[in-house]
Image (cartoon, grey):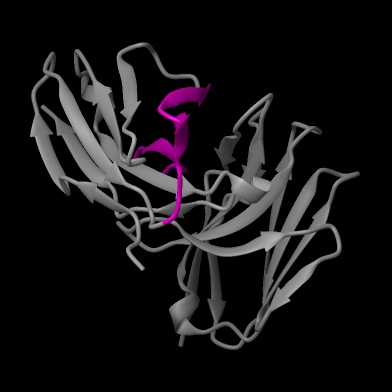
Amino acid sequence: RKEVEQDPGPFNVPEGATVAFNCTYSNSASQSFFWYRQDCRKEPKLLMSVYSSGNEDGRFTAQLNRASQYISLLIRDSKLSDSATYLCVVNGGNTGGFKTIFGAGTRLFVKA
Amino acid sequence: DAGVTQSPTHLIKTRGQQVTLRCSPKSGHDTVSWYQQALGQGPQFIFQYYEEEERQRGNFPDRFSGHQYPNYSSELNVNALLLGDSALYLCASSLEVGNTDTQYFGPGTRLTVL
């Protein structure tokens, strides 16, 4: 089993649609969680951190369920510019520093 | 506010050669992590440097080594290159103070091994 697993995708949605991405992680000692966005042949860029209380940034909402070891990202009112690969990221570590595990990513295509 | 920079942007090497990639962290950051991203996959954690020491390491062989300098910049060295080492190599920086582990990525170095 992979340490971080994401929906395989790709997701093809029309503009204005709501799309949800799911991610599960295997290490219950994981400490922090993020969603990153990666455009083709570019570096990952931080989209948002994920907290148990949930957090929202405009059209984007992220949620963490520690009991189920599950992370989600909801995008409302999809725009063409949302087309990208979305990466689920989990940090954990022993004493000192942290080790980062990325999911394989879910590709999103938003079409007019 | 300078972001994370990496050099070179592209590199072509042959099997068996050695390569050194360089990274300058975001202004004010003191921790550098390195990743390998093969085509169609998520980035894979190689190692992390803080205070000039490697303190976390992923599942990569000893052919992969690194260094961090007093100014927090870092190098990734790969010896005895294999075809499978062809990938995008990403550097990310973060700040240790406050125990924050939010990382910011550089544009990457695309390595091709022939």
Q: Is residue B100 visible?
A: no
The residue most toward the right is A67
Q: Residue furthest front?
A: B70
Residue at screen point 68% across, 24% down = A95
Left or right position of B21 against A17: left
Q: Position of residue B111 (x, y in %)?
A: 20, 37
**Range drawn in magenta:** B28-56
Q: Is residue A8 above or below residue A58?
A: above
**Which is nearer the eye, B73 or B101?**
B73
Location of residue A75 in the rendering, given as x and y in whole percent from the top left corner: 65, 75
> Where does the N terminus of chain A fall, quadrant-wise?
top right
Q: Is residue B31 magenta?
A: yes
Which residue occupies 63% across, 31% down? A2
The correct choice, above or below, for A80 with respect to B83 in the image is below
In this view, the residue in front, B77 or A61, is: B77
Left or right of B56, for residue B64: left
Horizontal placement of B21 versus B99: left or right? left
Q: Is residue A53 left or right of residue B56?
A: right
| A68 part of magenta stretch | no
Residue placed most toward the observer, A112 or A29: A29
Residue B13 image point, x, y percent: 9, 28
Above or below residue B81? Residue B97 is: below
Quadrant of residue A101 within the rendered picture:
top right
Q: Is residue A86 visible?
A: yes
